[in-house]
Structure formats: C-alpha cells, structure tokens
Amino acid sequence: MRVALGQFAVSKVWQENADICTKLMRDAHAGGADLLVLPEGILARDITDPDIVLKTAQPLDGPFMTQLLAESRNSDMTVMMCVHVPTGGQRVFNNLVTIRGGAIVAQYLKLHLYDAFAAKESTNVQPGGEIPGLIDIAGHKLGLMTCYDLRFPELARRHAVDGADVLILPAAWVKGPGKEAHWEVLVTARALENTCYIVAVGECGERNIGASMVVDPLGVAVVRAGEGPALIFADIDPKRISHARAVLPVLANRRFARPELADTTA
C-alpha cells in the first residue's frame, strides 16, 4: 500500500482549504497513492479566533465536503481528514472522515479532547463515545486516531489487538517547549509498542509543528516532512510487519486484556 501525507497550513477561508485539498488529492493520485491522509481541522483555522470551529463548522453534505467528494469520484484512492461538523447543540464534533469513490465510507468522532497545556478543546467540541472500527485498504487493516489520542496508548493498542497493522493519525500538534520531541517520541512509541506502521500527518500553520511522518513497526522513521507544506509518500511493506511481529512478538506476549472505553455516563 502506498500512502501519501498531505501537510499544509490551513487558512481561515474554507474555500482556499478545499482548493488545496483537491489539488493534494490529484497530486497524490498521480503519485500512485492508495491512501491520502490530510491533517486535523482542515475546514478553517485562525489563531486569533478561538471560536472559529463554531463559526465555520459544516455538515457533511455542506459545500466543503461536497467538493472533496466530487474530486474523489475521479479515482479509487481513499482520503482521510478531520473536519468540524455541527452536533445540533452548542458544540461541534471533531470528525475524522474517510472518503472513497465519491462516498463517505467511515467516520470517527475524536475521543480525547485537547484539554492540556492551557488549551481547552472541550469548550467548543463534544467528544465522541465510540471506538472506531478498522478500515480495510489494499489488504491492510487501518485503525483511526486523532491528534491528542496519541498521548493515550490504549486506543492504539485496542486497534492492534483488533487486527490493525497501520495506525492513522491526522493532527494539529501545537508548538511549544519540547512539543516537537513529544510528537516524535509518541509517534515512534505507538508504532513500536504495537508493531504497526503509523501514518501521522500534521498541520503546519503559525501555531502547529507540521512534522508529518511515517514510522515502521520497529520504530524506524521511513519518511518525514519539515515545518512547511509538503506532499510526501511512503510504502507500507507487509513483509516488514511480519518480520517485526516475529522478532518482537509483543502482541502475542501481552498479559493485559483488550482495552475498553470507560463508561463516563455514570
């Protein structure tokens, strides 16, 4: 499976972002990608307006997604990205949407909201309540996560136990002291401890680090981007996965049960 990572700086104007996304889709397809992963929060972004997600959220049948779905009809490539969608209430969902062939084939509502380092995502975003199922692409099983989910090893482990061999992570990783190191360490750890590839794609505007990367099941960075816009490619090698799980059988050797989502309704 060939994957493309489309890193870009998200504008405050949704149409500009739609134009960038459709071009990345065309370029990724031309590069032979089976899968294109885009960052988190690609509808609109403005560091001076903390409420922009409320002002710019669109339903999945709105103009932003309609344009991306139309572009996706031109190939059989799968595309994943995170957009904010209305809940019908006072907050929005942070939705990781998967599209292929002009249709939405999967959705994941972000579980862990970024209430850390003086940020409070939960002010405007409502958390999801379900662990997403795996997605089959080109003979691989993919597990979905979003940004801050990376800091919680249970979700990645749940995907691996359920049979995932690739983890997908759109993100908007905020800059700050040590944050780039956190990103690299955590992306590498999630790959290595689960003997999975991880495809981690970051937004690269004024506030976020970019630094998209693919790490293989033995913790080796296969490809990485810098701090600016980029479209990079990597090949997911099933033989590398088999080798990693033979020499480092952590999934077979584990003693803990399959992780489950806590009941927070009580």
Image (cartoon, rainbow, N blue to C red):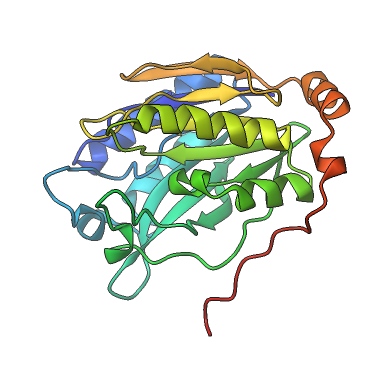
Q: Position of residue 77 (x, y in %)?
A: 60, 31
> Could you say which is closer to the camera, residue 200 or residue 152?
152
Q: Quadrant of residue 8?
A: top left
Q: Is residue 69 above or below residue 22?
A: below
**Which image quarter holds the N terminus?**
top right
Residue 191 shown left or right of residue 120 in the figure: right
Residue 201 shown left or right of residue 255 in the figure: left
Q: Is residue 264 above or below residue 158?
A: below
Residue 177 shown left or right of residue 156 in the figure: left
Question: Which residue is found at the position 51% from the left and 36% from the top?
Answer: 72
Q: Is residue 29 above or below residue 255?
A: above
Q: Position of residue 265 (x, y in %)?
A: 52, 81
> Could you say which is closer to the camera, residue 148 or residue 71?
148
Question: Which residue is found at the position 49% from the left and 65% from the top?
Answer: 128
Question: Which residue is found at the position 34% from the left and 62% from the top?
Answer: 125
Q: Residue furthest left?
A: 48
Q: Quadrant of residue 35?
A: top right
> Could you say which is closer to the camera, residue 91 or residue 253?
253
How many callouts does the rendering have? 0
> Could you say which is closer to the camera, residue 40 or residue 117?
117
* Residue 32 seen: no
Q: Position of residue 115 (x, y in %)?
A: 34, 57
* Residue 127 seen: yes
Q: Position of residue 238 (x, y in %)?
A: 79, 24
